[in-house]
Amino acid sequence: MGSQIVSLVVNDQRREFIARPGTSLLSALRESLGLMAAKRGCGQGTCGTCTVLVDDRPVMSCLVAVETIEGASVRTLEGVARGGELDEVQSAFVDGFATQCGFCTAGMIMSAEALLERDPDPSREDVVEAISGNVCRCTGYASIVAAILDAARRRRDAASSGGDAPAVPAGSEAADGAGVR
Amino acid sequence: MITAVRVPDSVAAAATYAAAGGRVMGGGTIVMAQVNSGSLAETELISLRKAGVSGIRVDGRVVRIGAATTFADIERSPELAFLHAAMRTIASPPIRNLATVGGNLFVPQPYGDFAVCLLALGATVEIAGPGGPRRAPVEDVLTAGVAQGEFVTAVALSLPAAGTWFHHKAMRRKLNSAAIVAVAAVVDTADGVVTSARIALGGVAPRPVRAVSAERLLTGRPLEHDVLNEAGRAARADIAPFDDAYASAWYRRRVLPVHLRRALLG
Amino acid sequence: MNHRVNPIDKSYFAGERRDGDFTVIGSVVQRSDVLGHVTGRTEFFEDLALPDMLHLKMYRSERHHARISGLDVTEALAVPGVVRVLTHADIPNNLYTPLKLIGVGPDDEPILAEDTVRYLGDPICAVIAETEAAAYEGVSRVRVDYTDLPAVFDVEEALAEGAPLVNEYQGQNHFIYEGHHCRRIRFGDVDKAFAEADHVFEWRYQSAPIEQAPAETTGCVVVPQADGRLRVHSDTQACFFTLDNTALILETPFNKLRVVGGTVGGGFGGKVDVVVEPVACVGAMLTGRPVKFVYTRYEEMQVSSPRAAERIYIKDAVMNDGRITGRKVTLYVDAGAYARHSPYGTTKAAAHLPGPYSIPNVWADCHCVFTNRTPSSAMRGFGVTIGDFALETQMDRIARELGMDPLRLRLINAYRDGDMKAHRKIAEGTALVEVIQKAAEMVGHELPDAYRRMSSTHREGR
Amino acid sequence: MAKLRGRGYASVNYPTGMNLGGDPSQALIHSTTTGTFVVSLSSVDLGQGIKTIAAQCAAETLGLPYGNIIVDTADTDTGPHCMGTFASRGTHRVGNAVIMAAAEAREVMLEVAAEELEVDAADLETDGTGFIQVRGADEKRIHITDLALAAHFEHGRTISGRGIFLKEKNEPVPETGEMDPDSCQAHACTVAVVEVDDETGVVEVLELHNAYEMGRALNPAMAAQQVEGGAWMGMSHALFEATEPYYPARDHGPRDFSEYLMPTAADIPVQRSVILERPAANGPFGAKGIGEMTANAPIPAIGNAIFDACGVRLDSMPFTPEKVLRGLDELRGLDELGDASERAHAPATGHERP
């Protein structure tokens, strides 16, 4: 049998490539499609740096044999910013200083996107659960949780103001200085 | 090295491939990790993702869950609401979107939390293979596995009556941790006294095990603090705990009664 | 912006702040790397796509301590896609130690094992193949015959008479500091302090090795250049440190190498050892093709050097009023099988004693000990983190024994500007008193006036 | 069953700008013809943010906006020597080298501006927005873009500078340990509040209160990142981390992030931190460096809080539920499997708080 042609819809574009047997979705994205945002932190499904959305659900792309999702829709961090504009999650990560080394960021943002698409008004507990598979060694998570909650608020504000208003920082959870749980 | 990945579109096609010796996989959470580290023995993968064995069907009190049904699917199923809390103790959302009901039966402890639930529920496993379809109690599959060329296509279980399902998983951290001790149980009571109990334990033996000593001890007695402690101590006869990166065998044995009691009393 | 900042209490050291009129310093400016991070465009070393790149995977020792009585790579070479298998014979200068750059020796670690392995995971041979899968397959077919040697895993057992010798290049199971068996601190007379003390307390502390666990594992891609140089894309924390050590191992002029690093997916000290670049460079030189060598997560967890386990004994002479008048510390750093950066870390540990307190009599023996485990090395707080665990637990125990407020005990003993530290450096810029006062205030821990008036800039009554 | 609450303290110092290796760090800076300044380094950014800090130091010294600075780093062909990013050297060594380079470049910048404006360079100042102007007469001014063009095309000058920071290598005296191994001392005090489950030994860290003294917070948001992430790492070390959980035996070493556990966002405490600044004479704008020390104080603070909560003294890291429970069983005088636990709820010492 050997290598075969696989077709996926990646960030709304149909992409075809040749995959060696046993190629993970992560390897296909990085090596065949040149999409480097998703990272390989472990290859075992334990770090979350390779998280992407397959048919709108977050998965560890290192654990997906690419032949098994022929035809699926795949979304990566490269597809999140539209027309060069950061979306609410990205802007909230920037403004909230929710990145340090940046290696977990792609996976974190994709887990957050999946959550917010399913639940535009998540609780802190929902956010915490959504990123429970994404390891960050730098931040201690608090800034990431705050940024995702902030992103949800920005997106709701944008939606309630007709959808064409720019994402505005809500500010209510901006640091009061005393650290936010 | 992997030489072929099969994605059969039917159970029959999957059976043909399986008979030839490939490794059957559900979501890939175990198998692909081995592929990525070059440690998988088999050279062919057979995915059940498109073999028509996904989905949850409810027929009265009986629920049939396809082997390739993911944990996320169960979390979204209103009929299986009693399992939702248990599902959320397993790994993380990006894993639960991949990991499957069938695959979980073959995961080594202290993983395999759903298998612990199935054991408590007395599930029946549907198996396909060279000899045609067969059914087996989940105990048998957990103990003996399936034969060469066989694979699981579904599990069937009866919905527990309201108030009879209990689940508690002790972890090293609040989310995304393997079990120190997992307890799943269906316990019927009448007039405050246990009439029947089926208790399964995870994390405390190489396979999920029934706490038969505790079941015996509880039957005919009230679900009370002291009785449960006694049952928990009795259950130590049913386990074969191990040391691992999470906890020692001693610790698992030591806290088993605490967690058995917490499972049933909250 | 929606960022979080911690309040700065400018009432402390107000007279020394010289704030001036900064325009950028002290301000929150956006991180220069953040837009790359949130769009996935930041380039980490592994994001380099090279069409003809080869993959290197390491076959590692399956024993803690053994002679290699046979090595057979024939089957590995027969795997389709395997291009080359490197052994120690391929490494120009196979013996090194990273701190030789600052004059620390002896060389004690083979790049690839010759006749002996000294820890589980010691690298033996490197399989280079067209694909990762082929490289793994090749590794699985390497055959090594081992003759087990006795191993030692406990630092004190390693120092005992008759213990198996871990590293014959060192010659004994501890690093030698200028003729001494350990790094010593000798300050005042601790024996006199113990004799005159109201109380003597002695306790033991222990830690286990800790992994730096960066999200990105250690690795590099080496690309041969048209001019004969090698371009090394690496996630090292230390470009020139890596370059210099690699050149010494390759026995090549330093200007033959170019190290390109930059954005690293977390380091925490774990990417200071030079453990992937030399072998990958040899592979690239011998094949003439780009070679990638990236640690698996397993290698990162179990083979890459962790924070050392330490065993620490602290014996204190204490007076009824809480003054600590003598402190004797015996500290063992478990360096594992090779020195790496541990001789340095042990010295740093010694300099840190007796903690942020002015104790007039201090005696310390800090041993850098070799055992048959994964070599340890630098990690965030190198030489200090575990010492602080021991020292600050000790302080709490003393306070409990004396029935004292643990913060007052610390304030009484806190070092101040002008104090001579145990390593004979005059303290300056101290602020222990103030952080304690501030923390007490934050949690509503009452301190009497005399303690609230204490200051790091002068000792009351002096 | 009881949840026992306790509070623990720890205070520490930390040496920054180590010079046991004696290696200096260099920085070069030059202006493009349009007034952007490129800082060339070979230091590595690991996420701690050295590129941002270097740019802030350059901008402040030059008196120009942060946006005028580009930092090019981590290439041994293009960057001057830096031995590496470790031992709390980044902010201290590189910051100082950048300041020195930028000061030299600023001097040239003012000389050229003086020629352009036909004034004395000593009378010039920068306004922080990009203008160089005569002090007290700011209508007489020139923008850096115009100035840089003029420097290159008319004056034949490079607006550039060189910087290095060296504190000579120190050799400890072997007999006494006398040495001068570092440049500054930073400080921290942590108060931890924990809750111990007296039946399982599970410890939950509820609160971490930290006071950190770091010389100067060059970028307060990035200082907060180090503080918050470092304290989390300390808590993680305290409760979870070991590559050899049965040390000194090597069995059951964790292989991945499933087995090597660290706290998730669900496990983190409330963190409150306050920063004190006692500027260091030898630090860049007084900064000492904060990255390494932040994990240290939380570990003993948590251990001491556990003792306060339940009377179990942990002298071995990490503080696993097993160690706590063995300690509790010993205090309660229970047998190997703690089977009398339901008869002895309260530990021998320690106390329950509301």
Image: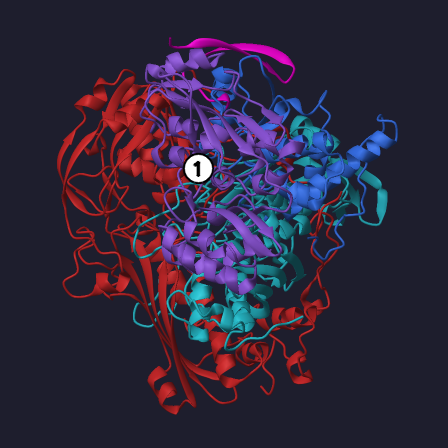
Chain colours: A blue, B purple, C red, D cyan
Q: Position of residue B68 (x, y in %)?
A: 51, 24
Quadrant of the image occupied by residue B5:
top left
Q: Secondary structure at mark 1?
A: loop
- Name the residue rendered at 37%, 26% in the picture: C230
Using the image as rendered, state which of residue C216 and residue C277 is in the foreground: C216
Using the image as rendered, state which of residue D31 and residue D55 is in the foreground: D55
The residue tagged 1 is: C217
Q: Residues within 10 Å of mark 1 (few under 14, many from 20)?
A: many
Q: Amino acid at mark 1?
A: Thr
Quadrant of the image occupied by residue C113:
top left
Q: Is residue D148 visible?
A: yes
Magenta highlight on residue D189: no
Q: Position of residue D211 (x, y in %)?
A: 63, 64
Q: Position of residue C385 (x, y in %)?
A: 46, 60
Q: Position of residue C460 (x, y in %)?
A: 61, 84
Left of C231 or right of it: where is D224?
right
Quadrant of the image occupied by residue C351:
bottom left
Q: Is residue D201 visible?
A: no
Q: Residue furthest right?
A: A161
Quadrant for the C terminus of chain C in the image: bottom right
Q: Magenta region: which residues? A: A1-25
Left of C432 or right of it: where is D59?
right
Q: In this picture, is B75 found above or below B256?
A: above
